[in-house]
Image (cartoon, rainbow, N blue to C red):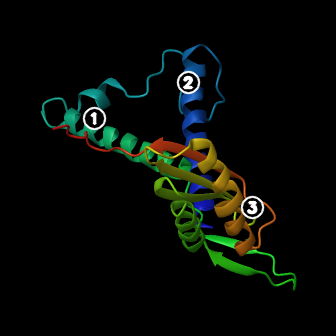
Amino acid sequence: MLRSVNRVLLALCGLVLIVLGGSVLAVGLGAHPPSWWIHDGKRDVLLSRADRTRWRPDDWWWPVVIAALAVILLLALWWLAAELRRRRLTEVVIDTGDGEGAVLRGRALEKAFATEAGAIDGVGGSRVRLDGRRSAPEARVRLALEGHASPLETLHRTATEALSRARSSAGLDRLPTEVRLHAVKHGAERVN
């Protein structure tokens, strides 16, 4: 709920800024605004000469205005980035067949899946992240392969063992999964 309210507020703020900026640009390019609009025409300015020079003797005024506008811009960009980033799935809805359903914690499913994948021979470490919707989760798996591991065999065992167990234990018909493999970093061996 809060997430959708934030997105609506962010969209409204953006829309207001685009409309105001676009109207100032249109008037500056020669469009004729309505009589009630704040700008009259091409020669009208946003700040009058008196408004611009009122605080000129004070050395602090313009740096404070510019710093405040920069802080507002950075906060708005941070807000936008926070709203657009993908969040981790906190729970998965499971159809129990009785019409009620059940809820499984996303972290529990991630941990069980990561443990199963980490137990495969040649896997030095595993991380699992659930994304998507509560009713249609998607998994992102990162596996760190040791030097002796076969990537094809590890991928096959991940799909047939760890993924199928995670899917069946959560009661999901399907669990789209993206698996990324990378090598475990290890120190150089000494030769005497």
Query: Please, what is the three-letter code of the amino acid marked with disc 1?
Result: Ile
125 left or right, relative to 9 = left
Q: Is residue 37 visible?
A: no
Mark 1 or 3, which is nearer the eye?
A: 3
Q: Secondary structure at mark 1?
A: helix
Query: Please, what is the three-letter code of the amino acid marked with disc 2?
Result: Asp
State which quarter of the image contains the C terminus: top left
At x 61%, y 41%, the residue is 15
Question: How far across and how far down the image is residue 123, in percent?
Answer: 49, 54
Q: Secondary structure at mark 2?
A: loop
Q: Which residue is mark 2?
A: 40
Q: Is residue 71 visible?
A: yes
Q: Which mark is first along the chain, 3 or 1?
A: 1
At x 77%, y 73%, the residue is 171
Query: Please, what is the three-letter code of the amino acid marked with disc 3?
Result: Ala
At x 71%, y 73%, the residue is 170
- Which class describes the residues within 10 Å of circle 2: few (<14), some (14-19), or many (20+)? some
Vertical side of 27 occupied by 1: above or below: below
Question: How far across and how far down the image is residue 122, in percent?
Answer: 49, 53
Task: State if disc 3 and disc 1 touch (CB < 8 Å).
Answer: no
Mark 3 or 2, which is nearer the eye?
A: 3
Vertical side of 32 occupied by 158: above or below: below
10 left or right, relative to 56 = right
Q: Which mark is first along the chain, 1 or 2?
A: 2
Vertical side of 55 occupied by 178: above or below: below
Front-most of 47 and 147? 147
State which quarter of the image contains the N terminus: bottom right
Q: Which residue is mark 3?
A: 136
Q: Which residue is mark 1?
A: 66
Task: State if disc 1 and disc 2 touch (CB < 8 Å).
Answer: no
